[in-house]
Amino acid sequence: MEKRPIIALDFANKQEVQAFLAHFPKEESLFLKVGMELFYAEGPQIIHYLREQGYTLFLDVKVHDIPNTAYHAMKRLGALGVQMTNVHALGGVEMMRAAKEGLIEGAEQANQTRPQLIAVTQLTSTSQAMVSYEQQIANSVHESAYHLAKMTQLAGLDGVVCSAQEAKEIHRLTGPDFQCVTPGIRLPEDAVGDQTRVMTPFSAYEHGANCIVVGRPITQKNDPYLAYQLIKKQWNGAIV
């Protein structure tokens, strides 16, 4: 089965989203990520709108709070009918367990299927210097991501957000069914921007990433659909 890149809808409002999606054929089955900028601007209404259009949705709000707050937040998000959402692994095992409990309850009460719940390890914008100096972590950024992935599995979540550079080792440590969702995807000609641990779609495929999240290399192109098709081909193992 052909895998779909997850397109990050890094837009300010619904109108910008509609203008972007107009570049794609209506019959194209898309997997879309709604992040904090769009969700904070439009609220749950943007989720309802995109669901009505038939899209698969990843709600990326990185819940990170005390366990009780994470539980209640995820109970609300579980009712929205998205296919995937996330927390931040640095919130700890107890918080992640509470978040999953809330997500299950919210989905059940709304007669929805429980979304996959994944946890952010280290953001793909996080450098080794940031981990060493700002976070005061003695291990490398990769080792920190591996440790947080193991804690995420211990909490009973479905997987993690990590760099594709870390996917192969995380699968070795956790097992093949543990999901590695990998942003920081760039084509060789694309600017890295504010990302540091990046990888091409084909390299992510080779490293065993389960999903790739792609924003600017699609959304900022003159022909987003053409860029999407190229990235999808590489993500499915074609050297182009």
Image: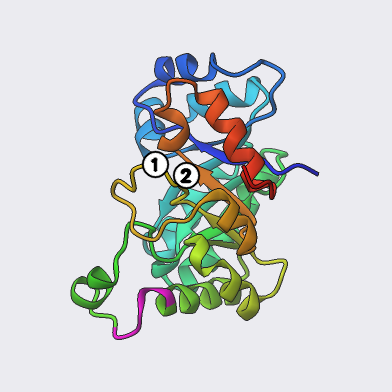
Q: Crowding at label 1, few (<14), some or many (≥20) Cα neighbours within 10 Å? A: few
Of 207 and 19, nearer the camera is: 207
Of 232 and 78, nearer the camera is: 232
Position of the N terminus, as image quadrant, is top right
Indicate whether 104 appears above or below 217.
Answer: below
The segment highlighted magenta reads 138-142
Residue 158 seen in this snapshot: no
Residue 187 has which mark? 2
Residue at the location (40% across, 33% down)?
Answer: 10
Residue at the location (34% across, 26% down)?
Answer: 12
Give percent across and percent down for residue 48.
Answer: 57, 25
Tell me the SS state at disc 1: loop
Residue at the location (69% across, 23% down)?
Answer: 28
Apparent side of residue 46 relative to residue 208 in the rendered image (left or right): left
Tell me the SS state at disc 2: loop
Q: Of all residues shown, which one is farthest toward the right?
A: 1
Q: Of all residues shown, which one is farthest toward the front?
A: 240
Asked if marks 2 and 1 touch (Cβ < 8 Å), the reply is yes
Give percent across and percent down for residue 135.
Answer: 24, 73
Indicate whether 144 appears above or below 181.
Answer: below
Give percent across and percent down for residue 147.
Answer: 47, 79
Residue 190 has which mark? 1
